[in-house]
Image (tube, helix red, strand yellow):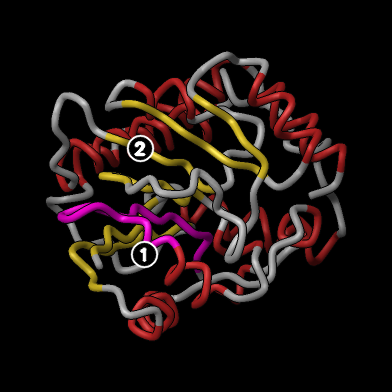
Amino acid sequence: MDRAAYSSMSEQEANHWWFVARRAIIASLIEKHVPLGPDAAILEAGCGTGGNLSMLANYGRLDAFEYDADARALAAARDVGTISGGALPGNIGFDGKAYDLIALLDVLEHVDDDVASLGALGQRLASGGSLLVTVPAVPWLWSDHDVLHHHKRRYTRESLEQAVGQAGLQVRAMGYFNSLLFPLALVQRVTHQMFRRRAPLDARPSAPVNALLQMIFGAERHLIDQIRFPIGLSLFAVLSA
């Protein structure tokens, strides 16, 4: 990603509505779909600036790798888990270790070979282990945001299932999320395309609006297993080897 994007991400991850609510949803997915023992081994693949490290460390012994040196330094400064350099698909690191949970959170869309990357991570799963993936969804919502963050693609449910199958992995659970705010996001993207207007880079809205958006998005953690959303800004998948 651009340097400005990493800087913005590091500053916003603690309080921005999207990051806070997304962490709550990811935690809920882990608790509902990923059986973990008290001494579970966990890997975050592509940890960025480390905004998910503390949440993931609640579930076991945490390792993480990150390709970008600047982002990796910000992650290491959080002093959570063991942070190493690495890249997908061929340089995962932590040789000889197998993991009960591997988290690949909004990373797959950045790599050139998504199938090889999923396959490489699947080979590092312990017996009974789970690979939790989140990706941006709905290709026709492609925008300057995707360009800024160096995305290669956005996914549909079908295209993600195809990549998973080609990687030799099995789907245990899959679905859209960030669905309740989809109409608002659609209006925002259409308006931007029409008028080429954009708020400052990933700007956090005013405190009341930030709290409202966090509440709406975060509410999906209670709904994600009750309702099969037909569309959303993101997809999740829980996979096994």
Q: CA distance from mark 2 to mark 1?
A: 14 Å
Which amino acid is tagged 1?
Gln
Left or right: 159 as drawn, with respect to 122: right
Q: Position of residue 175 (x, y in %)?
A: 29, 62
The C terminus sits in image quarter = bottom left
Q: Is residue 23 above or below residue 114?
A: above
For label 2, count other residues whose C-alpha is less than 10 Å away and answer few (under 14), some (14-19) or many (20+): many
SS at circle 1: loop
Q: Which residues are magenta?
A: 121-137
Looking at the image, do the residues carrying marks 2 and 1 touch, with CB atoms under 8 Å apart? no
Q: How many marks?
A: 2
Q: Residue at x 81, y 38 (%)?
A: 201
Secondary structure that dominates the magenta span: strand
Residue at the disc numbered 2: 42
User: Residue reaching furthest front?
Assistant: 96
User: Could you say which disc has been placed on residue 123 in the image?
Assistant: 1
Q: Is residue 139 above or below residue 38?
A: below
Residue 203 located within the stretch drawn in magenta: no
* Of residues 37 and 30, the one drawn nearer to the viewer in this rendering: 37
Q: Position of residue 184 (x, y in %)?
A: 53, 50
